[in-house]
Image: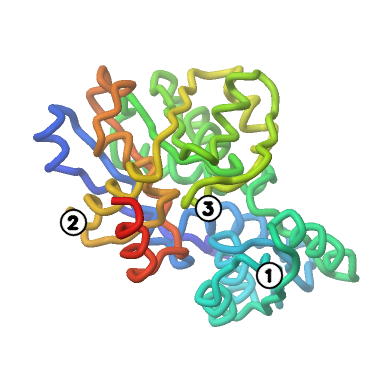
Amino acid sequence: MDKLHIETPIFESYTLNNKLGKRIFFKMDCFQPSGSFKIRGIGNLCQTQAALGAKHFVAASGGNAGCAAAYAGRQLGVPTTVVVPETTSVAMQERIAAIGATVKVFGKVWDDSDVYARSLAKKDGAVYIPPFDSPSIWEGNASIIDEANNNMHEPDAVIVSVGGGGLLCGVMEGLERNDWKNATVFTTETKGAASYAAAVEAKELVRLDAIASIASSLGAKQVCSAALDWSFQRDIQPLIVSDVATLEACQWFLDEFGILVEPACGAALSAVYHEHESIANAQTVLVVVCGGRGMTLDKFNNYCEQLL
């Protein structure tokens, strides 16, 4: 069966090229049918499980992973339930339901929803679909670099936002299997949601007490262990940016390309739009535009009124 994700284009930013004296490329996964890169990995896992006879998918997510699971279930003809926490907006619940999934609200935070989802998945024929921690998910996400390798030379730097670490693990797998050995990987997180940077500094997994950032899609209190493992194998440099910087980057990206993305995606964009000193020596930069369905124009404008 054909993959559930699409091959996304690479856009070059001539505005940033002129400003920075570099070549800046954006891998536009905001164009995926589920709204974000998540369909690459989650779609791959769901296809694998469907081939093994799965009769029901169960996921816990208040956002993009839920949209991806719902889309995969719809395309594969497998009933899907997405458990969301109470903090999930009505708009996002309606978006997931419109794709075709059954939405259940349980718990104050994602961790509570996840426990309930796992219990539902114990029923006959049901399969639990994690948001980021699965080798099948990483394998699917690695296709980002497969596609990039077919369309450009290896860059000096690759910039990727980190939440739970599933995208990072996929990017790292993609770099390895396409022999991109020289690119430095920069991870971006917002202050208040930087569990990966904390883990790299401590050289062990760190669990945050709380998430204090508007970039809710980066709100994993602890990254998957595989993401930390990659930091021992390859040059990965964590960057922490502010909520204000992410919003400004989202705004500039909107002005340049007419596309509105989540602050979680804006974290990666911020590294180039704000000329982060860490990438000063990189002449070619690939930014993974992870996308996101959790942002509306009203929500974006409200954030801007509060913070900018």
Taking the image as shown, residue 308 lies to the left or right of residue 23, namely: right
Q: Earlier in the sequence, mark 3 or mark 1?
A: 1
Q: Earlier in the sequence, mark 2 or mark 3?
A: 3
Nearer to us in this view, 88 or 139: 88
Which amino acid, mark 2? Asp
Instruction: Reply above or below: 120 against 109.
Output: below
Nearer to us in this view, 61 or 184: 61
Mark 1 residue crowding within 10 angstroms, few (<14) / some (14–19) / many (20+): many
Taking the image as shown, residue 286 lies to the left or right of residue 168, namely: left
State the mark number for residue 15.
none
Q: Which residue corresponds to the image point at 27% horizontal and 47% vertical from the top-left? A: 248
Residue 241: give x, y in percent of width and height: 40, 35
Q: Which corner quadrant holds the N terminus?
A: bottom right
Q: Looking at the image, is mark 1 or mark 2 nearer the viewer?
A: 2
Q: Which residue corresponds to the image point at 39% horizontal and 66% vertical from the top-left? A: 299
Q: Quadrant of residue 134 in the image?
A: top right
Q: Quadrant of residue 48 in the image?
A: bottom right
Does dot 2 land on a helix, a strand or a loop?
A: helix
Residue 117: give x, y in percent of width and height: 78, 64
Residue 297: give x, y in percent of width and height: 33, 69
Q: What residue is disc 3 on? A: 217
Residue 304: give x, y in percent of width and height: 31, 57
Q: What residue is disc 2 on? A: 255
Mark 3 residue crowding within 10 angstroms, few (<14) / some (14–19) / many (20+): many
Mark 2 residue crowding within 10 angstroms, few (<14) / some (14–19) / many (20+): few
| Residue that protrudes farthest toward the front in the picture | 306
Does dot 3 land on a helix, a strand or a loop?
A: helix
Q: Earlier in the sequence, mark 1 or mark 2?
A: 1
Q: What residue is disc 1 on? A: 82
